[in-house]
Image (tube, helix red, strand yellow):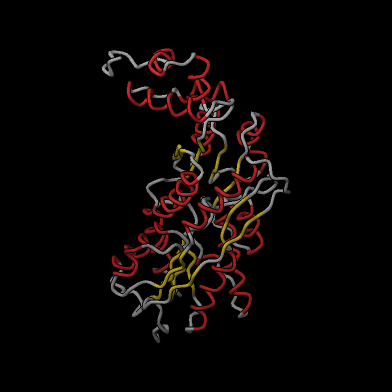
Amino acid sequence: MAADHSVPPTISEVAEAAGVGRSTAARTLGGYGYVSPELRERVLAAAERIGYRANALARSMSTGVSQTLGVIVADIANPFFGGVVRGISDASRARGFDTLVLSTHEDLDEEIAATNVLIDKRVDGIVVASAALDAASAGHIEQARSHGIPVVLVDRAVPGLDLDAVVVDNRTASREAVAHLIAAGHRRIGFVWGPPVAERPRRRRDLIDLASRNLWTDGERLQGYLDALDDEGIVFDADLVMVGEKTEENVVREVSRMLATEDPPTALFCTENDAVTGALRALRAAGLRVADDVSLIGFDDSSWAAVMEPPLTMIEQPTLALGVRAAEALFAVIDGKPAPAGRYTLGTRFIERASVAAPRKR
């Protein structure tokens, strides 16, 4: 039989080429039922010879297994999520699974649509960095579970949702970073990348309450900042907390506002990469130099941070390990291993470089 086809070869043609019945070819190519090693080898060789490719959707409908994991992240262009996805993909490939990745731009409606796509694709499990703020806004995740698709959270937990979650200890990492600034002599420390609200909370308890009702990672990092201030008896100042849209442009505006106050910050704690780059732009526009004029620590180390002048002190997250651990947690559920939902918390690494110095005397 010639391998040149104007249309894709069928299972019947594979069966004919292998000299076996169609049911034997179907079981072999579909990965279900028993086929002797000799016949399996003959069918697979015939399939390769005539250029047969399995229809993954049809196979998943007949076997209930697609050998595919779905991954939903906030921004695939973000190096952090790129590392997480690579970890998931590496762990999945080792199990013979493919990975289907969807990016949502931190938009809950897009996340809901992405979840529906993965349900329709009949994936075997989903790893999601969810934008849902609580269980009430996570109906799409429960919908996936109702279809028999296990779900594991990565990077951020969703309060009230009884699922495995693989995260880092954001609160401790932030507390230690701000404590480092305090140890260097800083008392006026700006928190960059705060609650996405227009009106600035004036009271500390209102800020904490607001943070608890926003993205989990944001709230944890803000709480770590406040913990470090409390440890040293430093009075919280709402003017040193950024509010508004979580965009680099708004970071520039908010940091510029802080720098223009009567008692400006001598240090900045930036909790995302875009917060770091926006802060750097604001400092440059104000004619200020990192370390010499304003110290800076960023959350989520990147390769460019080490080649800045001066090199930036950063918190490094174990992106690959997060992805691998999330995939392992998902495979445990897929394999039917009984265990209550848990939170798997990984540590971060504080990388001290040269962007922190003692505050300048005024």
Q: Residue at (59%, 43%) from the top-left corner?
A: 132
Picture mark count: 0
Residue 217, given in percent of the width and then of the height, sits at 56, 56
- The residue located at (38%, 16%) in the rendering is 17
Residue 101 at x, y percent in the picture: 44, 39
Q: Is residue 47 above or below residue 123?
A: above
> For the view shown, which residue lies furthest in the front direction?
38
307 sits to left or right of 266? left
Q: Is the residue 346 above or below the residue 144 in the image?
A: below
Q: Position of residue 8 (x, y in %)?
A: 34, 17
Could you say which is closer to the camera, residue 140 or residue 31?
31
The residue nearer to you, when weighing 269 against 41, is 41
Quarter location, residue 334 = top right
Quadrant of res 51:
top left
Task: Identify which residue, 74 or 123, lies in the foreground.
Answer: 123
- Where is residue 242? Give x, y as percent: 48, 60
Decide if residue 79 is on the left or right side of residue 143. Answer: left
Above or below, 333 relative to 18: below
Q: Work out whether residue 70 or residue 298 is closer to the camera in this orientation and state it.
A: 70
Residue in the image at 37% along x and 64% along y: 279
Residue at 40%, 87% in the rendered image: 361
Farthest residue to the bottom: give it: 361
Q: Dividing the image into 4 quarters, which one contains the N terminus?
A: top left
In the picture, which quadrant includes the C terminus?
Answer: bottom left
